[in-house]
Image: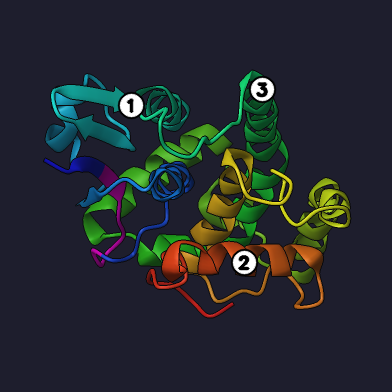
Amino acid sequence: MPIKLYDLAGAKDDCRFSPPCWQVKMALKHKGLDVEEIPWRFTEKEAIAFSGQGKVPVLVDGDKTVVDSWEIVRYLETTYADRPSLFDGKMGESGALFIKFWCLQAINPIIFQIILPDLFEHLHSKDKAYFRESREKLLGVTLEEFAAPNDATIAALRTALSPLREVLERQPYLGGEQPYFADYIVFALFQWARAVSPIQLLSKDDLIYGWRDRLLDAFNGYARNASGYPV
């Protein structure tokens, strides 16, 4: 029986934009594991009620259910230890955890400001009211007031990404010669944007653009073949 993954979708089933879900999907590909990707929307809480919570990703592996992208990946690393490692040891896991929080605090909010209008347009109609209410409560302003899809915000993003650029001047991936889970954490943010927005976040001469291209082509072009804009 294949592993099942409940994966956030937009108005169309093939619009898969969730960064945590993309982290898990790239991890599954890294491990060489087959998975059934099940489209899910924000308001379909009943579909994942069995997981004891209301967010995706939710992974079902036989009689085992795992939630939260970080816990899912740790589960995959332990359960499928005979397959390629996502961390290459405890030090790699700790480094990936740092990248996770760096992205959450320094990169995610800027990308969200840039792509927010496009993201909202790609949501399923039944999700839009929920998304607006929940995000505006969290932000303390309207979506329109928070959104900033402009050159200044794109420039701020490119500056915020400079630590990644510094690493890529020295090696092709955060993992060294090969990607590991930290790479997928950052890459998932670009898949988030690419799935819903035609805005060019990176210039083509940026080292990060080349790194992203390599990951788009990984696993027989799995990420590149996903629905999205050619940016």
Residue that appears at 30% across and 47% down: 7
| Dominant SS type (magenta) | loop
In the figure, is residue 70 to the left or right of 130?
Answer: right
Mark 1 = which residue?
Answer: 67
**Type of residue at label 2?**
Arg
Mark 3 = which residue?
Answer: 94
Out of 205 and 110, give the one closest to the viewer: 205
Q: Earlier in the sequence, mark 3 or mark 1?
A: 1
* 97 vs 231: above or below: above
Give the extent of the magenta segment: 6-13
Rendered-image quadrant of the N terminus: top left
Out of 189 and 216, give the one closest to the viewer: 216
Q: Secondary structure at mark 2?
A: helix
Q: Secondary structure at mark 3?
A: helix
Mark 2 = which residue?
Answer: 214
Q: Calculate the distance from the C-alpha at mark 3 to the C-alpha at mark 2.
A: 24 Å
Q: Earlier in the sequence, mark 3 or mark 2?
A: 3
Rendered-image quadrant of the C terminus: bottom right
In the figure, is residue 153 to the left or right of 114?
Answer: right
Q: Position of residue 173 (x, y in %)?
A: 71, 52
Residue that appears at 34% across and 60% down: 123
**Type of residue at label 3?**
Ser
Q: Is residue 40 visible?
A: no
Labels 3, 1: front one: 3
Residue 198 numbered mark, or none: none
Q: Position of residue 202 (x, y in %)?
A: 73, 69
